Image: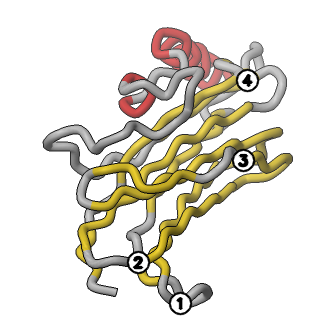
Amino acid sequence: MRMWKTTLAAASMTVLTLIGSTSPGAARGAGPDPSAPAAVPAGQGPSDGRVEAGRSGSDADASAVIRCEGQVQRPHNSTHVPGTVNVVVTVSCTGAVPEITTRAALYKNGRLVNQSRLRTQRNTRGGQNNVAVRCSPGNYRGWMYFKVVFPPGYRPPTGSSNGFGQEVALSC
């Protein structure tokens, strides 16, 4: 049984090494500049991102993988600040990580109207960020960027992704 787990872990590490931190979201440009694009690309559907890393070493097994998933929530009329539209982005990991950095952005009718500052949360399994704008009728959509720093011994050591949420018509 131990040999099977070690073989499975080695195969998992090989796959992780081959894909590195590239996920569908990362391949679309979550690189050194995590600023939101100026406009929603034509035909862009919802696309929350995912990243993962595995612990290296001979005793590692398939359960030694931390997976993190980003989610862009639906833009909505704020209940905390009347007269504004808000979008919240979250990241959830299956294990604690040293650092999660997030940025949220809000689009109205396909154009960027505001983005948050980068927010870093440490020694956690999850992170979140939000951004808001004054409400005027239109179609709103959120976007997120996130970067995860995995614990020492995990490969790859970091992963990042980005993605868009669903478009929502709001009349204020």
**Residue in the foreground of this view, choosing between 124 and 60:** 124
- For label 1, the crowd category at 10 Å Cα-Cα, with few meaning under 14, some 14 to 19 and many 20 or more, is few
Residue 42, compared with residue 111, is above or below; it is above
As measured in the structure, the alpha-carbon distance from the residue carrying label 2 to the one carrying label 1 is 9 Å
Residue 21 is labelled as none
Q: Are marks 1 and 3 in contact (CB under 8 Å)?
A: no
Marks 4/2: CA–CA distance: 43 Å
* Mark 2 surroundings within 10 Å by alpha-carbon count, few (fewer than 14), some (14 through 19), many (20 or more): some
Callout 3 secondary element? strand
Residue on which disc 1 sits: 82
Which residue matches tag 3?
95
Q: Which residue corresponds to the image point at 49% horizontal and 28% vertical from the top-left?
A: 30
First in sequence: mark 2 or mark 1?
1
Given the image, on which type of amino acid does mark 3 rest?
A: Gly
Res 24 quadrant in image? top left
Residue 154, which numbered label?
4
To which residue does mark 2 refer?
A: 135
Residue 170, quarter of the rendered image: bottom left
Q: Secondary structure at mark 4?
A: strand
Quadrant containing the C terminus in the rendered view: bottom left
Mark 4 or 2: in front is 2
For this view, does 8 lie left or right of residue 44? right
Where residue 6 appears, as percent x and y from the top left, is 65, 19
Separation (CA) of disc 4 from disc 3: 12 Å
Observer-nearest residue: 171 or 124? 171
Q: Amino acid at mark 1?
A: Pro
- For the residues marked 4 and 1, what is the alpha-carbon distance in whole angstroms? 44 Å
How crowded pointer 3 is (Cα within 10 Å; few <14, some 14-19, many 20+) is rated as some
Label 2: which secondary element: loop
Please report contact status of discs 4 and 2: CB closer than 8 Å, yes or no: no
